[in-house]
Structure formats: C-alpha cells, structure tokens
Image: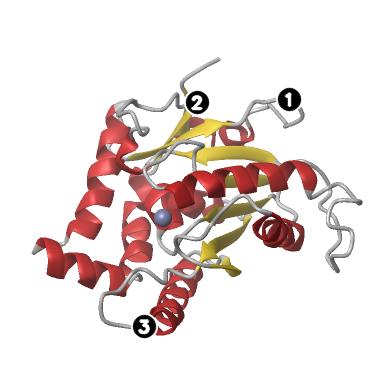
Amino acid sequence: MARVLAFGAHPDDVEFQCAGTLALLAQRGHEIHIAVMAGGEYGSASLSEYEIRRKRLAENAKSAKIIGARFHYAGGHDGEIQYDSWYRKITYRVLREVDPTIVFTHPPTDYMVDHEEMSRLVRNACFLAPVPNCDSQSAHETTSGVPHLYYWNAMGLVDIFGRPLPLTNVVDISSVMDVKEQMLACHESQREWLRHHHKMDAYIEEMRHNAQAQGQLVGRAAAEGFIQHLGHGYPTNDILAEMLGDLCIRLRE
Ligand SMILES: [Zn+2]
C-alpha cells in the first residue's frame, strides 16, 4: 500500500482541490496524510489570529478524520509562506515524517503567492528530503526516495493569466462527491464567513462548480484535475493512473 501526502498552504486547500481523489485512494486501502503549512490566521474578521488558527486546525483535523487520514500542521503562518531556509526545513520535516510514495500540492502558478511558494517548497522537499546532508541536524530520518509529485489544479481552474493549466490526469470523483462535500463542510468558520459576505453558500457551491467543470473535460459528472511533475530526477510513471485505473483519465501520453 502507498503512503499518500496532500500538502496545502492553508486549511481547506486540500479539500477544495483533491479530497475526492484522497477519498478514492483511502477506499483502496492506501495510507493518507493531509498536511497544512499555515494555520489559516487570516480567515476571520472577528477572531484573533491565535483563536482562528486553533479553530481552523481543529476543523482540518476533523475533515481528515472522515477518510481516516492523519493530519499534520507544519507550523507556518498565512501570508508569510516563502521559499526561505526556515520554511524549507519545516517542509522537509513533514516529508520525512510521512515518507510518501505520492505527493499532491499546489501548481507552480496560482492566484495567491502563498500557494506558489508552497508549490516550490514541496517540489524542493520531494527532491531533497532523501539527501542525508540536507538539513543534517534534523532529528528526522531521510525519506526513502523522491516521491511521485502531482500538482492539483489552480484555484478557479486558471493560471494568473487566465489560461487553463496543462493537466495530465483527470480523476472521476463522482462516486465520492458526498465525502468531498462533508470534508469541506468541516471548515465551518470559512463557510460561515463566506455565507455572511456573499449571502449564499458560496463555499460548497464553488467546489461543486469546479468539480463539474473538470468533469466536463472528460465526460464525467465530477472530477479533479492534476499535472504530474515530469522534470529530471522525479519518477515519471503515472502512479495515479496505476492506482485508480479507469477512474483516472490520462490527457497526455
Ligand atoms: Zn490557500
């Protein structure tokens, strides 16, 4: 069985972009880990950053529990994620705790700089966490090798220039949309906030809309799109398609 790590910048990013795929992998008996870099400190207009962080991490842990995933908080802060030495080290630590076979994270281009920095941090950690002399003072053992790396789709399904991303895989999540909704609904603080501001349940509606739009790419009711990292040194066999069979539609050969 594989160890699967979905590592997002903020609480709820993982649920929005790949909870359906994680639910399918959990059903197949794989070990699932959900990690978050920052504590969601900017996600409230009334609570202090400490109060909202505590609330949002608890919401995220509750969501992870729905699919039996382990939850990790790396220790970062909203709006501060950057490709520096400290953030690199706390990213290695999560990779080394999990030693994943397959990793999901943000694409290199996305609407928020926290997301783009996160993409670089995770890509870097995948490559360097197996290296003994990398952060050699750390108490954590190195990972056993470079994992398969997949980027989930950008928020809003377009890059910062409004273009669709070059997806390699689309996963049919029609059978687990209810699980994805349950997981996202655990993030009650964000749902309430948006409900108050938009006067509608925009949180769940946007997720449904994105899943349908991605499903339309492959003639399925609901889907999540991914791009496999295929650069030098990373495994290039499509392990996601191997794990999910017919539910994972390859868009490129
Ligand atoms: Zn985010």
Front one among 246 and 166: 166
Q: CA distance from mark 2 to mark 1?
A: 17 Å
Q: Nearer the viewer, mark 1 or mark 3?
A: 3
- Image disc number at residue 137: none
The residue that label 1 is drawn on is 232
As helix, strand or loop, the secondary structure at mark 2 comes to loop
Whether residue 199 is situated above or below residue 50 in the rendered picture: above
The residue that label 2 is drawn on is 168
Q: Quadrant of residue 53?
A: bottom left
- Residue visible at 36% across and 34% down in the picture: 160
Q: Position of residue 224 (x, y in %)?
A: 40, 40
For label 1, the crowd category at 10 Å Cα-Cα, with few meaning under 14, some 14 to 19 and many 20 or more, is few
Whether residue 189 is situated above or below residue 177 in the rendered picture: below
Q: Nearer the viewer, mark 2 or mark 1?
A: 1
Which residue is most to the left?
Answer: 199
The amino acid beneath tag 3 is: Ser
Q: Position of residue 74 (x, y in %)?
A: 61, 66
Q: CA distance from mark 2 to mark 3?
A: 41 Å
Q: CB of mark 1 within 8 Å of CB of mark 3?
A: no
- Residue visible at 38% across and 44% down in the picture: 173
Q: Quadrant of residue 199?
A: bottom left
- Image disc number at residue 48: 3
